[in-house]
Amino acid sequence: MMKELPLSKVYQLLEPGPVVLLTTARKGRANVMAMSWHMMVEFEPPLIACIVSNADYSFAALRATRECVIAIPALKIAPKVVQVGNYSGRDVNKFERFGLTAAPAEVVSAPLVAECFANFECKVADTHLVNKYNLFVLEVLKAWIDPAQKNPKTIHHRGYGRFAVDGETIKLKSRMP
Amino acid sequence: MMKELPLSKVYQLLEPGPVVLLTTARKGRANVMAMSWHMMVEFEPPLIACIVSNADYSFAALRATRECVIAIPALKIAPKVVQVGNYSGRDVNKFERFGLTAAPAEVVSAPLVAECFANFECKVADTHLVNKYNLFVLEVLKAWIDPAQKNPKTIHHRGYGRFAVDGETIKLKSRMP
């Protein structure tokens, strides 16, 4: 069961730069893509910028519906994440093909990914840089975590299928949030 | 000695989401800040988006000079990076105070950080979202790596001084760059 995560904590999961999945739904058809080009823009309400290439099948759905879910996969499903990245939603239902579960979200029509330890329901907040850079600004409306996944290790893409996996966590005395 | 890095490889170092340093120089005064809110926007020429808060001392320098350097620190200087994040350039010369070396760049006036294993000389390429979100789009003009730092581990901020350190690297069969 997913549990609600306070919106003020969303940045702590995205700021480290993990590979994420992005889901969309259009005309009853859900799709999922892998994405590494994203960043936080504001703490609360949480704003996220991301690049979704106009070559990606998800681009048109995101632009038309102005909704998506950003889901964070842990290491254990890394092979599925790479498969999601290797195929296009034009050609295949990637949820079925790669054994991912599309679960209903609460406030958007795009689905949650049940296997991911965090899911953020988002609406598109700004499209000024979409035509020039494929850059969308999203607002997170609702956030969920899976409490059953304890201290999940995330993956960080280094290009061509090489991923740095989270190692140890260190704590340094910081004044920054 | 720094060695030139092909611009086509810049994304492989930034896409994993490490904490970076951003340097500026204005009126003969160099400054450095820590930053985690950045992402790749384009492969080549490499474009990077980042958030530099208008509360940061670097903001005015970046906007006025339209130049900066993005430098990637390895784990071994993490304590210096946190100190850089804890202080403002308004109050202190952070290079001197925290023992970082400002080295001359080739095409921008902002300095390289000699202790960092990668340094990217950047110009501001787009300011459309600066007023609304403090979001700058940068173009990397020149990139440098320090070949003496082998397989540097980077740090990824999880909030309040907690950092995930790179662990193992895995390789999965991917069609993606």
Image (spheres, coloured by chain):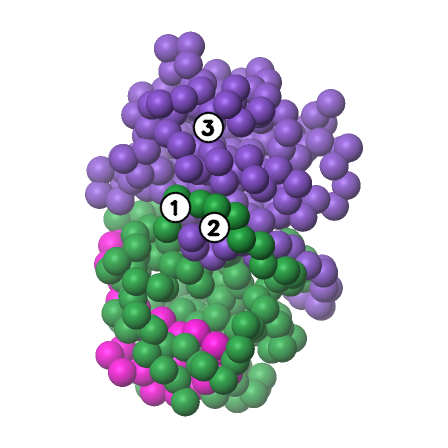
Chain colours: A purple, B green
Q: Position of residue A134 (x, y in %)?
A: 29, 40
Q: Nearer the viewer, residue B128 or B90?
A: B128
Tell me which residue sits at (58%, 15%) in the image.
A104
User: In the image, B132: left or right of A20?
Assistant: left
> CA–CA distance between discs 1 and 2?
7 Å
Element at label 3 = strand
Q: Is residue B108 visible?
A: yes
Q: Quadrant of residue A175?
A: bottom right
Q: Quadrant of residue B46?
A: bottom left
- Circle 1 chain: B
> CA–CA distance between discs 1 and 3?
15 Å
Q: Quadrant of residue A59?
A: top left
Q: Residue furthest front?
A: B173
| Type of amino acid at the residue the image marks with label 1 | Met
- Circle 3 chain: A
Q: Residue under circle 1?
A: B176
Which disc is residue A161 wearing? 2
| Nearest-to-viewer mark from 3 and 2 | 2
> Could you classify mark 3 by the number of other residues whose Cα lies within 10 Å: few (under 14), some (14-19), or many (20 or more)?
many
| Type of amino acid at the residue the image marks with label 3 | Val
Which disc is residue B88 wearing? none
User: In the image, B83: left or right of A150?
Assistant: left
Q: Residue under circle 3?
A: A32
Q: Residue furthest top?
A: A28
Question: Marks 1 and 2: CB-CB under 8 Å?
Answer: yes
Magenta-highlighted residues: B102-127
| Type of amino acid at the residue the image marks with label 2 | Gly
> CA–CA distance between discs 3 and 2?
18 Å
Element at label 2 = loop
Mark 1 on the same chain as mark 2: no
> Could you classify mark 2 by the number of other residues whose Cα lies within 10 Å: few (under 14), some (14-19), or many (20 or more)?
some
